[in-house]
Image: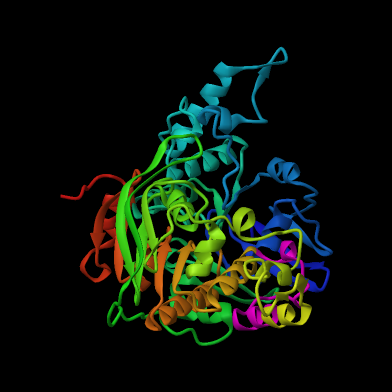
Amino acid sequence: MSYLLMQSITKTFPGVIANDEVDLSVERGSIHALLGENGAGKSTLMRILYGMYIPDHGRILLNEQEIRIPNPRAAIRLGIGMVHQEFQLVPSLTVAENIALGYEPRRNGLVDRKTQRLQIEEILARFGFSLPLDKPIAELPVGIQQQVEIIKLLFRKAELLILDEPTSVLTPQEVESLFKVLQTLREQGKTIIYITHKLREVKILCETATILRRGKVVGRVKVADASEKELANLMVGEQVIDQVFPRSQGVGQERLTLKEVSALDDRGVPALKNVSFSLRAGEIVGIAGVQGSGQSELVEAISGLRPVKGEIWLNGRRITRASPRRRREIGLAVIPEKRKEQGLNLSTHILENVVSTRYYKPPFSGWLTLFTRPAERFAARVIAEYNVAAPGVKSMVKNLSGGNQQKVIAGREMIDQPEVLIAAYPTRGLDVGAAQFVREAMVKRRDQGGAILLISADLDELFAVSDRLLILYEGRIVAEKRPDETAFEEVGLYMTGHLHAG
């Protein structure tokens, strides 16, 4: 019998059937992949399992016993835990404090620090972890923070762990460490549901996979019996073309130039240190680096959201102190890193979001008047050309899946063929088909003469589409590489400071 059995799970939202009679069966001590396009129903199904949503109907059995999961705390009591894409950690607290937060052992009404420490150390020893328990989370690399999230669940006695896109911000070395951790957990009898768009990882880690499409289960396969291409075809319901992107056939004039650019982060600490490079028409330059190496500050510096020392030139004009709007008028478009904070207004609809960067000029306005019909036509064009799963232009952005929110931003920024595009994590959260669509759009724009700066945590993506790679480490560019002339492992060593430009 299955350790976890979800039967006929149905969940609807206004205008959307997110889960339609979904069945999921997971064996104890296995790593089970949950696959599907954005909007396929994966996140909804897992939120039901973790107690964040209540299904309209259906039932859940754990160890052959029917259970109810009204909230996440109930899920944790049942031994179900979830590691979200965005970690749920308190940066100022230590590793040990984060692990035990909300579940501290007590004696005489006070937190029993000694017992807490012993319990954590016992878990670390059992599963082969080594963590700096007394260091604040803010001082740790993202790979270690992820391990803290996993230990946090084990401290709460989780037997079933749900991991949502766990490698999206990890270096190759950190991915390898995570795989070892997950394999150890499996050997120790833990059960893992693994949500990812990286089918190579599914082939390495998982025994079985359940594939959702448009809210329904379309397949349950043994991973060993299916190729990556076959899995992708099940996800999108059509033949997926292998991603083969030829390199640039020729570059033109300089479009974006940074000269000795330095900038501080939000704490006043140097984040960019004398960064210099040029981006030319007809090329895609990829920026690789571990999280926190200065990528965020670089995007904000170029887009005009962060003051800098040094010089920034765009299409032959010095824009070091120009406003974000002025930079757009000269030819800059930006897909920001933080879609919810910087890219979208979640409290309004698609139409207002896609015209937010152009509402003040024709054909959308004139003589202090906003024209509705051109805006509606433009929003409908974005929805159609970028395959946004939404009923219409007045659909609220907050009701879209994360992947469809990202498509709204990508469409808004790319549809008018900008001369210079800064694309920060443009395919984060997108499924295989949608990610391929965005990458093809970037390559097409490059071939038309556009200049694209691509910031990504996905080395597969960087190697697939970049003509040149610049590697950031602690705010400096430490190497420039050609994807066809280097290896993942070498780039990973530069990203982590184990190799230096010489």
Residue 474: percent from left, percent from top: 34, 43
- The extreme front residue here reads 367
Q: Is residue 127 visible?
A: yes
Residue at image position (48%, 42%) is 147
Left/right of residue 349 with respect to residue 261 in the rendered view: right
Left/right of residue 475 with respect to residue 67 in the rendered view: left
- The extreme top residue here reads 108
Please tell me which residue lies in front, 385 or 35: 385
Residue 90: percent from left, percent from top: 58, 35
Where 452 sits versus 381, above or below?
above
Residue at image position (52%, 82%) is 233
Please tell me which residue lies in front, 157 or 265: 265
Residue at image position (24%, 45%) is 498
Residue 242: percent from left, percent from top: 41, 82
Question: Is residue 206 on the magenta stretch?
Answer: no
Please tell me which residue lies in front, 31 or 502: 502
Which range of residues does the magenta coloring cover? 379-401
The picture quadrant where one finds residue 395 is: bottom right
Where 498 sits versus 6, above or below?
above
Residue 64: percent from left, percent from top: 72, 55
